[in-house]
Amino acid sequence: MRLLPRLSRRNLVMAGAVGALTVAASAAVPAPDAQAATGCAVTYTANTWAGGFTANVTIRNLGDAVDGWTLGFTFPDAGQRVGQGWSATYSQTGAAVTARSMSWNGALATGASTSIGFNGTWTGGNPPPTVFTLNGTPCTGTTTPTTPAPTTPAPTTPPPTTPPPTTPPPGGQTPVAINGQLRVCGVNLCNQYGRPIQLRGMSTHGLQWFAHCYNDASLDALADDWRADLLRIAMYVQEDGYETNPAGFTNQVNALVDEAEQRGMYALVDFHTLTPGDPMYNLDRAKTFFAAVSARNAAKKNVIYEIANEPNGVSWATIKSYAEQVIPVIRANDPDAVVVVGTRGWSSLGVSDGSNANEIIDNPVNAANVMYTFHFYAASHKDNYRAEVERAAARLPLFVTEFGTVAYTGDGAVDVASSTAWLDLLDRLKISYANWTYSDKAEGSAAFRPGTCAGGTYAGTGVLSQSGALLRDRIRTPDNFPTA
Ligand code: IDC
């Protein structure tokens, strides 16, 4: 497996672990007194693990335009249940499920498609549903009984709207296939050959808001079109995040770890604490979450743990104490994984609190294989922050787990000059990074234009914001990872 080229690996996985199914129907040419033509094609894919799954469903309208839709299907097994979903309102009675459109995705023109999804649980098995209806019309290859003429098979997938897959990287291998299990060596992140590397990639937005942006098409684009090495999985703890549904968010993170692995990308599991800024507020939640995620993913080589996004309003001593309680929980399951620890002042190495990296250099976390987080927003954080990063990088292993090209609000104009200065510095120092965000939120830091995730095309430059275009250009240049 390890030596298979990137594209073959993905195809292999699609045919294997990920169950995929497409069913289609189309309307005949209407008879003179015909009702509105109806028809639909549904693609249902499920990513399954013990007891849980994430389903992504693409609905294509092959009939007349509709304004508001209801998708119906029945689970084949009595133990299958819909849990938290996105881009539709779900309900389940017995094995019968309905998904109703939202205000923003109810209008579907002829030929248009939309993607929805949900997390679910299963007990006896997780076979995919085989029969779907759209507004009551079966998507089964036949139309309503009153339709007389024979039907023509509809295309089962939308016509290609994305550029063809890009050529795999030189050597045809994925970042994980080349670099394997990572470890910290000196102040660097090193690959399986003990050689320093830099990982370049993107951060999700909050999973509680933007799960619909993370599907096969968007993750394929990240791996194959952007040629990213890294997906940061931002799981907020507050703001309707993990604390509201620990099992659901844990499942969602695990599913994305698998999706990254299938595409040969590293997965940075971000316990996205922000408000309150004291990580101790979430200590018990962190232990529970990391115990589960590290146990389940212990055998994988692609997982990196980020235990506290942005501590703020607390001392380094408190952050260090938190780290020294959470890291052993991870190490008990996954002894060799790299762990990244947040720093004081919103992960500014203390600079935003008027301090500097000395407090860490003089009093590092008492654990091996640990890195320290630095975050910046290029329009807000400039020369004095760059100078401290350059100085600290000689003494501490740093990982830029999040940065923006805009102001610290996440919005506003892209600061091209400052972003370029930052990225040049990180490249020169081989500091890994993930950019905020791989999403279509209407804010300057988002890589995609608003509405992109409701469409289904992610590759190429047509869907990108200014920030997205800048990052794609930077990330897709060759990695030249050392192989010996
Ligand atoms: C911001 C998002 C914004 C969201 C807000 C919620 O961009 O859409 O409404 O969070 O809290 C960070 C944080 C990150 C912030 C980002 C921009 O890690 O959660 O995202 N930022 O403000 N630190 C500095 C900036």
Image (tube, helix red, strand yellow):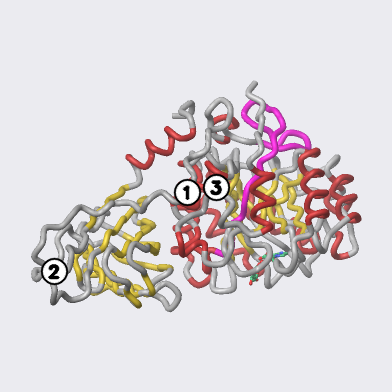
Distance between the Cα atoms at labels 1 and 3?
Answer: 13 Å
- Of the image marks 2 and 3, the number of the one nearer the N terminus: 2
Tell whether 200 sits left or right of 154: right
On the image, numbered disc 3 is attached to which residue? Answer: 222
On the image, numbered disc 2 is attached to which residue? Answer: 144
Q: Residue at x 68, y 27 (%)?
A: 194
70 in relation to 384, above or below: below
On the image, numbered disc 1 is attached to which residue? Answer: 162
Is residue 193 part of the magenta span, yes or no? yes
Specify the farthest residue to the front.
32
Q: Residues within 10 Å of mark 2 (few under 14, many from 20)?
A: some
Magenta stretch?
183-206
83 in relation to 482, above or below: below
The quarter of the picture showing ligand 1 = bottom right
- Of the image marks 1 and 3, the number of the one nearer the N terminus: 1
Q: Position of residue 295 (x, y in %)?
A: 49, 48
Distance between the Cα atoms at labels 2 and 3?
Answer: 40 Å
Specify the amino acid type for callout 3.
Leu
- Of the image marks 1 and 2, the number of the one nearer the N terminus: 2
Badge 1 element: loop
Name the image quarter holding the N terminus.
Answer: top left
- Looking at the image, which is closer to me, 208 or 312? 208
